[in-house]
Image (cartoon, rainbow, N blue to C red):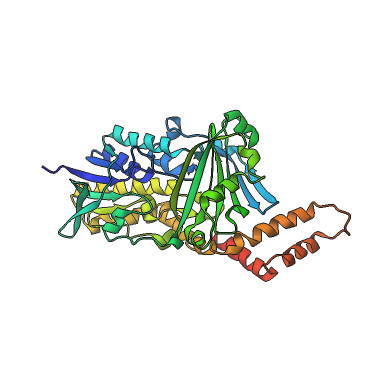
């Protein structure tokens, strides 16, 4: 006899495990399926989670979750071949009330396993190492999943199976993404002592730093580099638009090695041991790649729904995933109460997302992905800014010049005119 659940969640990442946790807590029979050998074993992200969404689901989660360091310092670095220009802010209030830890660095293998375990504790059944091959469809509605020879029934399926969501595609809710809608991310985890990490990034105690890089590290391609400090490791990597990589001879694995050995980066990681290497696709097109979010008997959440926001100076994904998992759970709990899992009933999911920060923020920054396709952001402006600052601090016996003249000379030498610079600045200020 086929087993039937109230809900089957495909994917034990932040969206899937949050949904499974809340539905099981409400008394529903939930099956949480993970393709990897363990939750988090196949997942990757840069290394930081903003706390507000999970704090809504599990207040004070940091007291028990395997978080690494609360981020107290943000650094943006523009790079050219020989120069780099960093803007840094340290705000210790991010580690104290009322923020109650604004964001944390994390390692997904540990964090995802913890969150999936919370779902299990609440009563969900976790099944790992299972690849879901297809959806079961009866009379036009989703009624379960097929994994190999096994068929499992459910009132509703939640597709939380990542950026390349097979479930959303099988349900006819999403199309295969294009290379212009995703980025390729690679990451190394480099082991160093906690004391050495704090010393190199000028951090006190267990406070952490998040540093983003623009310019030479991607050879001017759309994307950037990142470093996040963990307790006794550093997460270092690159994220580059897949469509741009395809046009070049560059291999991202070589670029990340070059990035690591850049003279501006090397002192931060020197002597460290690489203990983990991973690569993954990252959804980057925002609302332009969002699938239909619900159908008869199915919801789409997390990366599968394209819920990632990249503003160049802020990159968010996990808070969107967790909030979408929460909205999916609330929708299913209400649907179960009414015994109605039709498309109309599940449309409540989209309504909840619109009322939350998820669709509000994605709509607010809707034009950001298109603005960041401007190649000047990754090539011309880092060179302009670094060159100007270098000129300001250079003393070589040349005749003196006022600052305005130095600015105008540097702009003249760049590939961007004043009008173009002003236009991009105006657009960036309005869009980002």
- Residue at the far front in the pictured view: 249
- Which of the 4 image quadrants contains residue 175? bottom left
Q: Nearer the viewer, residue 360 or 130?
A: 130
- Which of the 4 image quadrants contains residue 377? bottom right
- Residue at the far left in the pictured view: 1
Quick check: can you spot residue 99?
no
On screen, residue 294 above or below 30? below
Give the residue at x 57% y 46%.
257
Q: Position of residue 222 (x, y in %)?
A: 54, 59
The quarter of the rendered structure image containing the C terminus is: bottom right
Total count of labels: 0
Q: Position of residue 346 (x, y in %)?
A: 26, 55
Q: Nearer the viewer, residue 329 or 304?
A: 304
Q: Position of residue 263 (x, y in %)?
A: 67, 45
On screen, residue 196 above or below 265? above
Quick check: can you spot residue 86?
yes
- Which of the 4 image quadrants contains residue 269? top right
Give the residue at x 59% y 44%.
260
Q: Is residue 373 left or right of residue 295?
A: right
Q: Position of residue 122 (x, y in %)?
A: 29, 34
The quarter of the rendered structure image containing the N terminus is: top left
Q: Is residue 164 left or right of residue 257?
A: left
Give the residue at x 35% y 53%.
352
Q: Nearer the viewer, residue 183 or 201?
A: 183
């Amino acid at each position: 006899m086929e087993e039937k659940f109230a809900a089957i969640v495909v994917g034990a990442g932040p969206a899937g495990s949050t949904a499974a946790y809340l539905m099981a807590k409400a008394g529903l029979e939930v099956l949480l399926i993970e393709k990897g050998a363990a939750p988090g074993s196949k997942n990757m992200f840069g290394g930081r989670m903003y706390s507000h969404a999970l704090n809504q689901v599990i207040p004070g989660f940091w007291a028990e979750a395997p978080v690494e360091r609360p981020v107290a310092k943000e650094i943006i670095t523009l790079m050219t071949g020989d120069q780099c220009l960093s803007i840094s802010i340290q705000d210790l209030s991010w580690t104290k009330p009322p923020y109650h830890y604004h964001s944390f660095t994390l390692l997904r293998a540990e964090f995802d396993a913890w969150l999936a375990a919370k779902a299990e504790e609440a009563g969900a059944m976790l099944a790992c190492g299972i690849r879901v091959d297809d959806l079961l469809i009866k009379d036009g509605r989703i009624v379960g999943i097929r994994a190999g020879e096994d068929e499992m029934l459910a009132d509703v399926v939640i597709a939380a199976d990542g950026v390349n969501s097979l479930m959303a595609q099988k349900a006819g809710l999403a199309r295969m993404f294009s290379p212009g809608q995703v980025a390729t991310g690679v990451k190394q985890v480099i082991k160093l002592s906690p004391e050495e990490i704090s010393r190199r990034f000028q951090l006190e105690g267990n406070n952490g730093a998040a540093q983003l890089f623009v310019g030479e590290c991607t050879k001017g391609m759309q994307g950037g580099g990142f470093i996040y400090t963990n307790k006794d490791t550093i997460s270092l990597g690159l994220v580059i638009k897949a469509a741009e990589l395809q046009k070049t001879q560059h291999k991202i694995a070589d670029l990340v090695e070059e990035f690591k050995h850049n003279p501006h980066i090397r002192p931060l990681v020197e002597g460290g041991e690489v203990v983990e290497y991973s690569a993954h696709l990252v959804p980057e097109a925002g609302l332009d790649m969002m699938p239909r979010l619900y159908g008869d008997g199915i919801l789409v959440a997390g990366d599968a729904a394209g819920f990632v926001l990249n503003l160049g100076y802020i990159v968010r994904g996990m808070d969107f995933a967790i909030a979408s998992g929460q909205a999916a759970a609330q929708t299913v709990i209400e649907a179960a109460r009414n015994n109605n899992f039709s498309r109309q009933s599940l449309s409540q999911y989209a309504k909840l997302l619109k009322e939350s920060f998820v669709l509000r923020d994605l709509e607010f920054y809707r034009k950001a992905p298109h603005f960041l396709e401007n190649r000047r952001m990754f090539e011309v402006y880092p060179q302009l800014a670094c060159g100007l600052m270098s000129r300001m601090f250079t003393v070589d016996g040349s005749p003196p010049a006022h600052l305005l003249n130095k600015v105008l000379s540097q702009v003249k030498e760049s590939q961007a005119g004043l009008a173009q610079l002003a236009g991009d600045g105006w657009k960036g200020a309005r869009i980002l």
